[in-house]
């Protein structure tokens, strides 16, 4: 199968568009990360000022311990929320990249199958068995690839569920610890 100049240019154009699309998605992810960090830094600075004022107003050790206990639970919750938000940004950006790569892989598979079909039509007489075996091997490879993609998706879902469970456990442990200290 020969490609015309228009087909080659169209292929390169599509690849460049994909590259720029992925670059934009990467920058969007970085922008979200910077925004998250700026927001978290501003909040931390404001809280540090408030905490410093509260500490300066403490009159005895018991009041200091109560203040410390009151600060611990919100800190754990904020850390967990920050981690969740960070995970959401990373997984969202990763999902966009995954979609683009899947689309490219699907397109490449279609083109490869077109080449194989074209080659099988032009194969010499008596090679039908070899062509059928080759097509069967390609189909098996495609099935294996789909199975791997499904397994990766399931592993990602399990990892996300585990991350959320650990974050919730940490927040609940902080609440329990804070409640016991009071």
Image: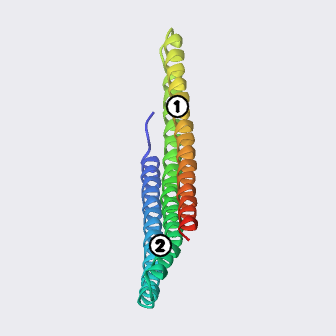
Asked if residue 101 is positioned above or below residue 41 in the image, the reply reads: above
The answer to the question of whether label 2 and label 1 lie on touching residues, with beta carbons closer than 8 A, is no
Question: Where in the figure is residue 5, as x and y percent of width and height?
Answer: 42, 48
- Disc 2 to disc 1, how far (Cα)? 45 Å
Tell me the tag on residue 154. none
Residue 106: horizontal and vertical position, in percent?
Answer: 53, 41
Quadrant where the image shows the N terminus: top left
Q: Is residue 146 above or below residue 71?
A: above
Q: Judging from the image, what secondary structure is the residue with disc 2 in?
A: helix
Horizontal and vertical percent position of residue 175 = 57, 64
**Label 1 neighbour load within 10 Å: few <14, some 14-19, many 20+:** some
The label nearer to you, 2 versus 1, is: 2
SS state under label 1: helix
Of the 4 image quadrants, the one containing the C terminus is bottom right
| Precedes in sequence: disc 2 or disc 1 | 2
Residue 170 vs 139, above or below: the answer is: below
Looking at the picture, tell me which residue is in the foreground, 8 or 136: 136
Foreground of the two, 35 or 159? 159
Q: Which mark is residue 36?
A: 2
Question: Residue 167 location in percent, x, y?
Answer: 53, 57
Count the marks: 2
Q: Nearer the viewer, residue 114 or 6?
A: 114
Residue drawn at x 57%, y 62% is 176
Looking at the image, which is closer to me, 63 or 75?
A: 63
- Circle 1 is placed at which residue position? 113
């Amino acid at each position: 199968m020969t490609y015309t100049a228009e087909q080659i240019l169209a292929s390169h154009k599509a690849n460049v568009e994909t590259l720029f699309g992925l670059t934009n998605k990467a920058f969007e992810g970085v922008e979200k990360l910077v925004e998250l960090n700026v927001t978290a830094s501003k909040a931390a600075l404001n809280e540090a000022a408030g905490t410093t004022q509260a500490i300066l107003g403490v009159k005895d050790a018991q009041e200091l311990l109560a203040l410390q206990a009151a600060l611990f639970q919100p800190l754990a919750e904020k850390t967990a929320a920050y981690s969740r938000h960070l995970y959401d940004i990373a997984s969202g950006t990763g999902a966009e990249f995954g979609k683009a790569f899947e689309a490219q892989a699907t397109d490449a598979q279609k083109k490869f199958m077109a080449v194989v079909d074209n080659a099988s039509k032009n194969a010499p007489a008596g090679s039908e068995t070899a062509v059928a075996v080759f097509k069967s091997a390609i189909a098996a490879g495609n099935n294996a690839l789909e199975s791997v993609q499904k397994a990766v998706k399931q592993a990602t879902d399990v990892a996300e569920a585990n991350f959320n469970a650990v974050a919730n456990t940490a927040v609940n442990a902080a609440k329990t610890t804070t409640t016991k200290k009071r």
